[in-house]
Amino acid sequence: MSKNHIHRRTFLKGLGAAVSLPMLESMSPVKALASSSAQPPVRMAFMFVPNGVHLQEWKPAATGVHYDLTRILKPLSPVKRDLTVISGLTQDKGRANGDGAGDHARCAGVFLTGVQPLKSQGSEIRAGVSVDQFAAKKIGHKTRFASLELGTERGRQSGKCDSGYSCAYSNNVSWRDAATPMTKETNPRLVFERLFGNDSKGERNESLARRQRYRKSILDFVLEDAKTLTRKVSGNDRMKLDEYLTAVREIEQRIERAEGESAMHPNVLAGLEKPEGVSSSYEAHIRLMGEMMILAFQTDVTRVSTFMLANAGSNRSYRNIGVNEGHHSLSHHQNDRVKLDKISRINTFHVQQLSYIIQKMKSIPEGDGSLLDNTMIVYGSGISDGNKHNNENLPILLAGRGGGLVRPGRHIQYSEDTPLNNLFVTMLNHMGATTDSFNDSTGHLPFLS
């Protein structure tokens, strides 16, 4: 047990800096250690991938615990016991339902809402409150940020992107209300500064300028606070604090390297505009953004996050894995074996990034388990097959144990047309954002616990 009790909301402070801390032994008084109040919080995250998947190489043949990971899911082997593969879920309002073409925009707009987007490319847009923002409104007051929205591809919030649908639908999965998408951040530096900067914009800017001028770390500005804290805590906490601050510095250095790469390369990436300060490596970009989400959860800065690995309908090419054609173009495969193989390779690449993020979370001790044990991560697409543009049997994974309320390590097959929002109702209740329904849900999703 530590020498002194430290408040959970303790920050290491300095000019422009407010470095949140992970959960330490010293943050729990003696009585609380044996009570439920000492339990780590439950978090939720939603990771979106575009253009569906090659379902025949995604879906396991067997259900229950005795299933084999398919070609696409193989990268998840190290965390198979922490994973639930879910089949049979549907977002009905992603279907045309009389609105005609525009499946890619619709699938993103409906993915976390279950509400049919209004077909409009002008200023009038309408979707619905997304599950992450529903949770943020219920529990967001408990953390510094109610939610965190991340992505890798910037996008417009107006104009035509897909068959008469506004770009706002293609470029967002998080919606605060029916008419307000939550704009995602795609630049790792800006996320880092947001997570570790204080509330004074002037001080944050001055701190960043000094660090860049003198090649200093943000940790240099909180050094005195860190030294004071280490004198107050136990040996276990000192080790945990050192590991955490080392991880923060490593991420900061990776951001600096990415900024250096960005300055050396043209601002064009696979036909897409690349935000300044972003690595030319798509894999490095995804992993950096994923680690920002992990840091935010680890330090309890937020308990709710969304992460778009790419925008709906993204036509990014994947030359790093030998796929030169655009993803969206390939998704219209017409059952061509060569195209399907390339789709599987893209799907596998995305799952590799998910596996990296999950393994990273599993490696972080928290309470009696790990950070992953206290998290629920939904990974999937709003379209099942990019060629059919269908919205039933969506490819959905659920990683983590939700604080012990989810029993992973299985493939669960639900009856076709079971609403995806039933999963969201169950997750919301596990989070403490209690509700009996969410948009077009028909109840809780059984068999998860």
Image (cartoon, rainbow, N blue to C red):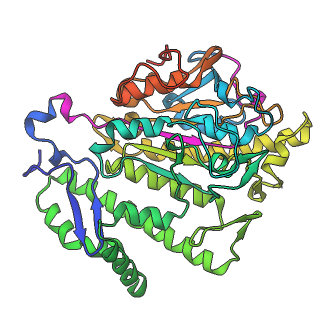
> Magenta includes 57?
yes
Please indicate, yes or no, whether residue 70 appears anywhere in the rendered image.
Answer: yes
In the rendered structure, the answer to whether residue 113 lies left or right of residue 271 reads left
Quadrant containing the C terminus is top left
Q: Residue at horizontal 71%, vertical 34%?
A: 383
In the rendered structure, the answer to whether residue 40 lies left or right of residue 263 reads left
Coordinates of residue 134 in the picture (x, y in percent)? 43, 35
Please indicate, yes or no, whether residue 51 appears anywhere in the rendered image.
Answer: no
Between 178 and 415, the one lying in front of the other is 178
Q: Residue at horizontal 46%, vertical 38%?
A: 132
Coordinates of residue 337 in the picture (x, y in percent)? 90, 37
In the rendered structure, the answer to whether residue 272 lies left or right of residue 239 reads right
Coordinates of residue 335 in the picture (x, y in percent)? 90, 33
In the rendered structure, the answer to whether residue 302 lies left or right of residue 225 reads right
Q: Residue at horizontal 64%, vertical 58%?
A: 155
Q: Is residue 360 above or below residue 114?
A: below
Q: Which residues are magenta?
A: 35-62
Q: Residue at horizontal 14%, vertical 30%?
A: 34
Quadrant containing the N terminus is top left
Q: Is residue 274 above or below residue 214?
A: above
Coordinates of residue 61 in the picture (x, y in percent)? 71, 19
> Magenta includes 277?
no
Between 226 and 259, the one lying in front of the other is 259
